Image: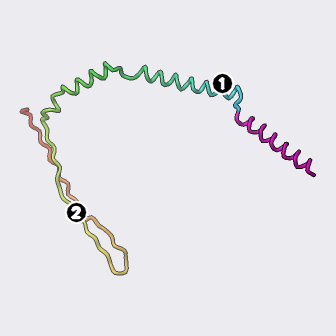
Amino acid sequence: MRIRKCAATVMLIVAAGVSATAFADPTVEELAARMERMQQEMDKLQQQLRNSATKDEVRVVRDDVATAGEWRQPDTLIHMAGYASVGYSKSESGDGSFNVSRFSPIFHFQYNPDQ
């Protein structure tokens, strides 16, 4: 009886070790497929890098934006105003509710061609 228990324990330990090893080690084909996917991702990233702007191009655009005159003295003016009113009603036997009574936005746009 004791020998059977020891044999069963040894068999379980060996089986657990073999199955863990089988699941832990990827096959050569899996590693090759993973490497191929990584190579494709790297190629895509290199293509994106080639298509991106250089530091000199970014510097030129930044200088153009900094010296643009239309941002310093605009010839238009926008003003938004208006009003709204909201109501709330609740009966003794029901739930309360909000309602929009009035909403009146006002937009002003001014163009000054002299500037």
The residue indicated by pointer 1 is: 32
- On screen, residue 37 versus residue 9, left or right, reads left
- On screen, residue 27 versus residue 51, left or right, reads right
**As rendered, which of 74 and 27 lies closer to the eye?**
27
Q: Which residues are magenta?
A: 1-24
**Does residue 39 belong to the magenta stretch?**
no
Residue 64 lies, with reference to residue 102, above or below; the image says above
Q: What quarter of the picture does the C terminus occupy?
A: top left
- On screen, residue 105 versus residue 90, left or right, reads left
The residue indicated by pointer 2 is: 102
Circles 1 and 2, Cβ within 8 Å, touching? The answer is: no
Q: Residue at x 12, y 35 (%)?
A: 75
The kind of secondary structure the magenta stretch mainly shows is helix
The percent coordinates of residue 13 (x first, y second) are 80, 42
Q: Residue at x 77, y 39 (%)?
A: 19
Mark 1: few/some/many CA within 10 Å (<14, 14-19, 20+): few
The percent coordinates of residue 103 (x first, y second) are 22, 59
- On screen, residue 34 versus residue 3, left or right, reads left
Inspect the image, locate mark 1, and give the three-letter code of the amino acid beneath it: Ala
Colouring scheme, one of rainbow, by chain, secondary structure, one colour: rainbow
Res. 26 image quadrant: top right
Q: Secondary structure at mark 1?
A: helix
Q: Residue at x 62, y 28 (%)?
A: 34
